[in-house]
Amino acid sequence: MPAMADETLFQLLHTQVVAAAYGAGRGSGDEGLRAGLTVLEGMGFRVGQGLAERLPQGALAFREELDTIKFLCRDLWGAVFGKQTDNLRTNHQGTYILQDNNFPFLTQMAWGQQYLEEAPKFLAFTCGLLRGTLSSLGIESSVTASVTSLPACKFQVVIQKA
Amino acid sequence: MRKKNKNKNNKNLNASWLKPYSLLQNYPLYIRSIPAEQELKFHYTVHTSLDVVDEKVSAMGKALVDQRELYLGLLYPTEDYKVYGYVTNSKVKFVMVVDSSNTALRDNEIRSMFRKLHNSYTDVMCNPFYNPGDRIHSRAFDNMVTSMMVQVC
């Protein structure tokens, strides 16, 4: 079942990518933490750009912003994580919240709240991924993530108005 | 809104032209023509066709049509050439210029050529050594374009 193995492989790779971003003496403390997050987010951004070209094969041109975000929730999440986001909220003024109650990168550390502080490192790549995909599709945005209780997390997308 | 433009000009008898345009400033990502001497003329043709592409795209945006295709079809016929367009979701535009005397090229073929172009461009995009917005130097892409133009000419 090659499809099932894909997700595990990507999760394992992602874990290593996070470790590599913080290993090799990149520095501890806030400075190092920020540097690592930037690296991960940048990586995700470039991957998102490529994904934006490859994924919508056969999909028709998006008519409006909401369509694009829905595409993220369904197709992008489906392709990368094998599931869809659980909830999408918007204030109809350019802010969208994508909620995932069982985020794959967080499930392995989700027994209790012990690793809550480490969670941002595992969300940075995905933030970049979302930003990169949107950017390729013509939408400039800023994406942040927040976790209150593992393994659920929320990604907040704020569209930059020109 | 960012605009990327990729132009491919394909001329039947002697000339093929490929020209991709890229974002914001609408500059070309890739240009190819057979033969190479007539490039300047094609530059002009393709550049003016960008306006038509924009028209079509914005027209589609306003129409309450469920289906929005990526293939734009015949943009406009000039006395010598026919110009075809295709735009991707990431606003990359492909423009193809074909000699009018080539009547053998049917719509289906043009569509499949654009599809191949799109697929090759996607591969270029996913190449980690390629920075989005740069000119395309990929050999695989070149080979694909060459084989396509040879097929037509």
Image (cartoon, coloured by chain):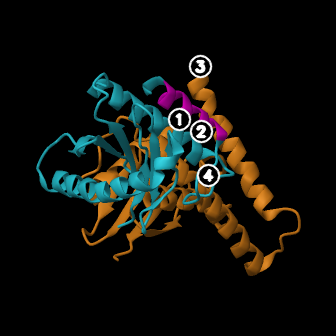
Chain colours: A orange, B cyan
Quadrant location of residue B98? top left
Q: Residue visible at 67% across and 50% down? A: B128
Q: What kind of residue is marked 4?
A: Ala
Q: Which residue is mark 2?
A: B142
Q: Which residue is mark 1?
A: B145
Mark 2: amino acid: Asp
Query: CA–CA distance between discs 1 and 3?
Result: 36 Å
Mark 3 on the same chain as mark 4: yes
In terms of secondary structure, what is the magenta stretch mainly? helix
Question: According to the image, label 4 marks what residue?
Answer: A110
Residue B15 in which image quadrant: top left
Q: Which is more toward the observer, A152 or A45?
A: A45
Measured from the top left, where is residue B49 in percent x and y?
29, 54
Contact check, label 1 and label 4, Cβ < 8 Å: no
Q: Residue at x 61, y 63 (%)?
A: A41
Which chain's residue wears label 2?
B
The residue lying furthest to the left in this view is: B64
Q: Which residues, given as a range, are shown in magenta?
A: B139-150
Task: Please give left or right for residue A96 compared with residue B37 in the image.
Answer: left
Front disc: 1 or 3: 1
* Position of the N terminus of chain A by quadrant: top right
Label 4, secondary structure: give it. loop
Q: Nearer the viewer, mark 3 or mark 4?
A: 3
Q: Is residue A114 above or below residue B6?
A: below
Q: Position of residue A162 (x, y in %)?
A: 35, 77
| Callout 4 and callout 2 share a chain | no
| Residue designated by label 3 | A1
